[in-house]
Amino acid sequence: MKSESASGADVRPSVRQRTDRDLGDCVWVLAEVHEHDGYPVNWPDFPGTWLTPPSLMASWVAELDGRMAGHIGLSQSDVGDAAPGLWSARTGVSTDAIAVINRLFVAPWARGHGIGALLMTQAVTEAQDRGLHPVLDVVASDTAAAGLYERLGWQLLATVEQQWSPEQKVAVRCYAAASCRTP
């Protein structure tokens, strides 16, 4: 999709690898998303660190009309990720051959421009280029995100309950990319 800038020119979103200089803007957009949508469910004490977990392999940002508009990460399977275990059990593939798509968000003002799909395409392509099968977990109440994944052809593996803290149990939908090309 496209939009028009103040000059009337067509503006298309772009995706590029995230740099350390982008973290401040990413945290700002994440705060907007959290206020608007409640993602992430639990606001991290250190949002910049949350966006750069030790398992992170790569991350990208989307820009629209010169502004930070979205973010996505690709990580190795980590404790707490449910989808890798489900995909491994279903296919017999080692979790070492699985990549987890995470930390996907799009600024509320930038929605409707295909940014989520662009970011997903970038992360899936990178996973496939590395010979990894992409999977992801999403809070079951995030129906907009689940709708995006399903429109993109992702396969629902299961909905599982996770104990995030002694007083917080959360339903999580686990997805796997429907098919992958070989590298």
Image: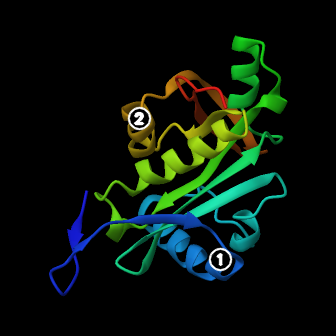
Q: Residue at x 34, y 54 (%)?
A: 114
Q: Residue at x 51, y 36 (%)?
A: 140
Q: Is residue 120 left or right of residue 47?
A: left
Residue 132 horizontal/vertical position (percent): 71, 33
Q: How is the image coloured?
A: rainbow
| Residue indicated by mark 1 | 23
Report helix, strand or loop for mark 2: loop
Please tell me in which quadrant of the rendered image residue 146 appears: top left
Marks 2 and 1, Cα distance to the nearest angstrom? Answer: 27 Å
Q: Which mark is residue 57?
A: none
Q: Residue at x 50, y 59 (%)?
A: 105
How many numbered marks, from 0 up?
2
> Which amino acid, by three-letter code, is at mark 2?
Leu
Q: Nearer the viewer, residue 172 or 69?
A: 69
The mark nearer the N terminus, 2 or 1, is: 1
Q: Quadrant of the N terminus?
A: bottom left
Please tell me in which quadrant of the rendered image residue 157 appears: top right
Residue 112 horizontal/vertical position (percent): 28, 57
| Residue indicated by mark 2 | 152
Q: Nearer the viewer, residue 132 or 111?
A: 132
**Vertical relation: 21 (above or below) 134:** below
Mark 2 residue crowding within 10 angstroms, few (<14) / some (14–19) / many (20+)? some
Report helix, strand or loop for mark 1: helix
**Vertical relation: 4 (above or below) 163:** below
**Vertical relation: 37 (above or below) 8:** above
> Which amino acid, by three-letter code, is at mark 1?
Leu
Q: Residue at x 64, y 36 (%)?
A: 128
Do the numbered discs 2 and 1 sit on residues whose CB atoms are within 8 Å?
no
